[in-house]
Amino acid sequence: MNLFVPQQFRQKFPLITRYAKYSTDKSQSKSSIVYFDNAATTQKPEQVIACQQRYYGEYNANVHRASHQLSTNATFAFEKARTLVQKFIGANSIKEIIWTKGTTESINLVVQSLARNTLTSADEIVLCASEHHANIVPWQIVAEQTGAVIKILPLNEQGFIDVSNLDEFISKKTKFVACAHISNVLGRINPIKAVIAKAKSVGAISLIDGAQAVAHIAVDVRALDCDFYVFSAHKMYGPTGIGVLYGKQALLENMPPYQGGGEMIKTVSFTQTTTFNSLPFKFEAGTPNIAAVIGFGESITFLAPLLADIQKGYNLYEQKMVNHCYQELAKIAQVNFIVEGIPDIGVIAFTIAGHHNHDVATSLDASGIAIRSGHHCAMPLMAHLNIDGCLRVSLAAYNTIEEIDYFINCLREVLLEDFSQAGVQVELQQKNHAKTEQLINLRTKEMKDIITLFTTVKGWDSRHREIMLLGKNLPRMEQALRNEQTIITGCESLAWLKVEQTRQGVYFFSADSDAKIIRGLLVIVLAAFNHKTAEQIHNFDIKEYFNQLGLIQHLSPSRGNGLLAIVDKIKLLAKE
Ligand code: PLP
């Protein structure tokens, strides 16, 4: 038995070791990354990367179609991966393993091939309150198509699916029950066996979203007795763009194809009915993502032994990190956990009193710490919890206790800084940002002031501080003005924009957001557009401006899109 050795495991991940030089001395931490966004996607071990490269460099060919040697080699590796997945989840046969793009496509396949063809307006679909959008929206689409009704299983206080009253939600009317094995926000292992058994007892079909489970717990689909189980390779050290639909053979046999094309047919004719290939190929139209499948096989080879033998210590190590992280966070007075109690896997969600989630996440990013803020593709859960978003730390077995301590220290520093609504300006900021302090009238701040400011500060860390300070000084809009008319849609956080126009046709905009980082960006954007005519506004090149400020490469696509949404609204309001 090879015991799990955290440091050796960590060394297997090139991206992790490449950016591993983090330090509590901030001046040395510029190019380091502490990656705590593993629930979104994990990093890849060298053997997975190399395996895909070997395919492209040594035996790249299409699968199943040709009789030449390269194709035989590619097909062999491709199908070997399917067998590895079959064994990994304890499926009966490789016929039950369908390649898809990932969890999302797997759910859509079941919904459109099976649910759409069987549901009626008398039927019900049961989901859970904490589902990821991937396990909500496809069902909403099919409910719209068929008239079926969606019912929601509630959560208990600790964030688990409440199974105390399943009879109330799952009845003879229920045709499908779909829920996550582990929520991507709550990190709880749901009592899915009880849910599956209840679904079975009323003749309903069960689908389990295993996206967050497969990297952390051993899954046995036969023991669970679910009808479908879906997951993605990229969350279990494998490549992106590949995932699995496991389905019981008898169900899959009776389902029509999801997509048509090459490989999924037996015969095609213009005069006779086209006939379809056998399982699993019936559901795999077109050239598959061959390199990703082969890489996925390698990630299973990598992960399976760690999960199969609990004595090795992989799970113990993960749990040790979760406990440590949770306990250290719990010592910070402003931290509010989304649900109380140590999660079952390394997914810890929380908010921070007096601080906007995006401000905290971007401040930590400036120290090289990657955590997530937002709704985590679980908007109904956020609504249920009465919050508009939260922060999420998600750990993997290549993370370390030292990284957690570094994160906690940085978080404490962020909370000490005067980015909070009620905070006190720290000496450091006063020293570094005297320039910003001189810029008093932010509502009429000049573009040249902004350009001067940003060309004198270097590095994202300093620029981020300046943006936060600009945001801190932006006057708040009156509460009554923050309404449906002024809201900017498409922005990552809530943001509002108001316009006034002088008799000379010059525009003046004021804006606000509940995130300080967005308020800072608004100051920068408004400086470019205020006191301009409609023509000047429409002719202004905002991307060039952001380039000049050295900001464009630091704006995430979602925040970048949010800024573009602000600019679009400004242009819409400035009528030529
Ligand atoms: N379900 C859960 C619980 C998830 O966490 C995710 C991704 O974060 C998904 C579904 C969607 O996975 P993918 O984007 O790989 O299809």
Image: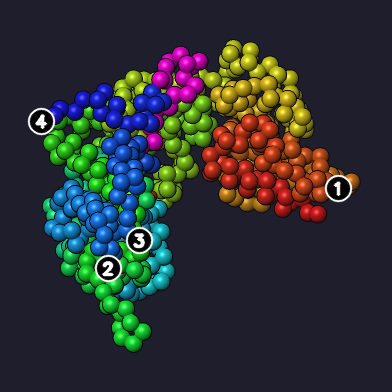
Of discs 1 and 3, which sits in the foreground? Answer: 3
Which residue is under mark 2?
282
Residue furthest to the bottom in view is 271
State the image coordinates of residue 483 (x, y, percent, origin top left).
Answer: 63, 48
Q: Nearer the viewer, mark 1 or mark 4?
A: 4
- Callout in the foreground (2, 3): 3
In this view, the residue farthest toward the right is 504
Residue 35, magenta (yes or no)? yes
**On screen, residue 96 above or below 542:** below
- Write down the residue under mark 3: 287
* Residue density around tag 1, few if under 14, some if 14–19, many if 20 or more, within 10 Å: some
**Front one among 522 and 272:** 272
- Magenta-colored span: 21-38
Q: Quadrant of the N terminus?
A: top left
Determine the secondary structure under disc 3: loop
Q: Which residue is mark 4?
A: 1
- Answer with mark 2 or mark 4, whichever residue precedes in sequence: 4
Q: Mark 2 or 3 closer to N-term?
A: 2
